[in-house]
Image (cartoon, rainbow, N blue to C red):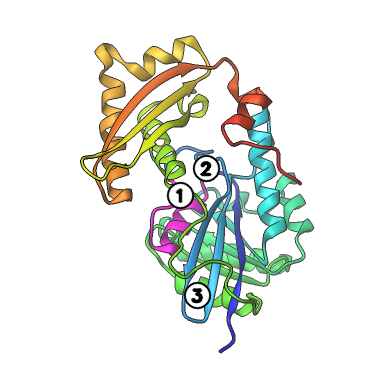
């Protein structure tokens, strides 16, 4: 039997549904999802296994023009994923102004023009559009002749995802599997726990707080008897942000802790004791040493 195996990078502007697509294709919540842009900060690897193929998806941060160092590192992860990929899945959000779907963004053009591997365009959120707009959009994009395949999908509802898999398999190279069949990702539990806590911060705080916050796991102790112990620190950039995270009489951080613990237990399928603290690290998003220390290391374009 010929085995197909390879890397598929999921690329697009912020909030087009890349993480939702990964989770839907894998059937597990590997990437956190919120309504806010820039939720995904790192390259998230998810593995879809079958008897005769292995598709390794790379969820990436949204394509943007960086304004500070963390965003620059995030952009580098996008290009790393592109360089690693055998196939590119580029996503557009049709629920936004259809006239904006021209692929004229300079960063987008740079990416698409740099890719020599097969490119599949996914027009996402078709459940929030109508047939006329969708047909006109597909016709317009087909005339550009930039993609090997165009597929309308709804990542959240799972519409046409079987077509996405079929299209990927058409272009996927023959290669032995890169990972064991029972492996879903290359990240450890600490990473997913920190992401789930960060997701709750994104969901429950407004303005600059979610974008200024990072979560670092300081301790993760698995126990044979009793609950696992997790100690996490929420990093913020300004002294004024710390009391907002904590809240009046600690109510805000208690709520984040409760929601995070429930999400973590669902993910780990076991009970945990979660302890949260808040620390201020001024301008951490622009501090190269601190970014390196918490895992945002320089990439390669």
Looking at the image, is mark 1 or mark 2 earlier in the sequence? 1
Q: Residues within 10 Å of mark 1 (few under 14, many from 20)?
A: many
Q: Tell me if label 1 and label 3 are in contact, CB under 8 Å.
A: no
Query: Considering depth in this image, is 227 or 276 the residue closer to the camera?
Result: 227
Give the SS element for disc 1. Answer: loop
Give the SS element for disc 3. Answer: helix
Determine if residue 150 is in view: yes
Indicate whether 277 appears above or below 97.
above
Residue on which the image places disc 3: 163
Q: Residues within 10 Å of mark 2 (few under 14, many from 20)?
A: many
Residue 117 horizontal side relative to residue 208, left or right: right
Q: Tell me if label 1 and label 2 are in contact, CB under 8 Å.
A: yes
Residue on which the image places disc 2: 40
Q: Tell me if label 2 and label 3 are in contact, CB under 8 Å.
A: no
Task: Report the mark closest to the observer, 2 or 3.
Answer: 2
Q: Residue at x 51, y 28 (%)?
A: 211
Residue on which the image places disc 1: 31
C-alpha distance separating marks 1 and 2: 7 Å
Residue 190 horizontal side relative to residue 40, left or right: left
Q: Residue at x 21, y 43 (%)?
A: 225
Q: Residue at x 50, y 68 (%)?
A: 180
Query: Considering depth in this image, is 48 or 166 the residue closer to the camera?
Result: 48
Q: Across the whole image, how many numbered discs are drawn on residues?
A: 3
Looking at the rendering, the stretch of residues picked out in magenta corresponds to: 15-32
Query: Considering depth in this image, is 200 or 49 the residue closer to the camera?
Result: 49
Looking at the image, is mark 1 or mark 3 earlier in the sequence? 1
Looking at the image, is mark 2 or mark 3 earlier in the sequence? 2
Give the SS element for disc 2. Answer: loop
- Residue 297 location (% of width, % of height): 66, 37
Is residue 23 covered in magenta? yes
Q: Residue furthest left?
A: 226
């Amino acid at each position: 039997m010929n085995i197909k195996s390879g890397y598929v990078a999921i690329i697009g502007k912020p909030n087009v549904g890349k993480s939702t697509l990964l989770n839907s294709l894998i059937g597990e919540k590997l990437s956190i999802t919120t309504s806010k842009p820039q939720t995904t900060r790192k390259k998230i690897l998810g593995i879809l296994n079958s008897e005769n193929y292995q598709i390794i998806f790379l969820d990436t941060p949204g394509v943007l023009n960086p304004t500070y160092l963390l965003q620059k590192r995030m952009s580098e992860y996008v290009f790393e994923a592109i360089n690693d990929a055998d196939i590119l899945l580029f996503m557009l959000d049709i629920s936004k102004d259809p006239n904006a779907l021209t692929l004229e963004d300079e960063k987008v053009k740079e990416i698409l023009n740099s890719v020599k591997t097969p490119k599949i365009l996914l027009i996402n959120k078709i459940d929030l559009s109508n047939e006329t707009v969708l047909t006109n959009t597909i016709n317009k994009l087909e005339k550009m002749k930039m993609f090997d395949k165009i597929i309308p999908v709804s990542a959240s509802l799972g519409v046409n995802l079987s077509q996405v898999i079929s299209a990927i398999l058409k272009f996927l190279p023959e290669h032995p599997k890169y990972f064991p069949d029972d492996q879903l990702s290359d990240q450890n539990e600490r990473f997913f726990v920190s992401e789930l806590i960060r997701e709750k911060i994104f969901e429950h705080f407004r303005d600059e707080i979610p974008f200024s916050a990072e979560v670092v796991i300081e301790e993760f102790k698995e126990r044979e008897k009793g609950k696992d112990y997790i100690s996490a620190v929420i990093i913020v950039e300004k002294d004024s942000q710390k009391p907002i995270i904590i809240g009046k009489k600690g109510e805000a951080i208690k709520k984040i802790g409760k929601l995070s613990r429930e999400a973590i237990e669902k993910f780990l399928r076991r009970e945990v004791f979660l302890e949260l603290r808040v620390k201020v690290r001024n301008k951490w998003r622009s501090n190269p040493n601190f970014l390196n220390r918490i895992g945002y290391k320089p990439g390669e374009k």
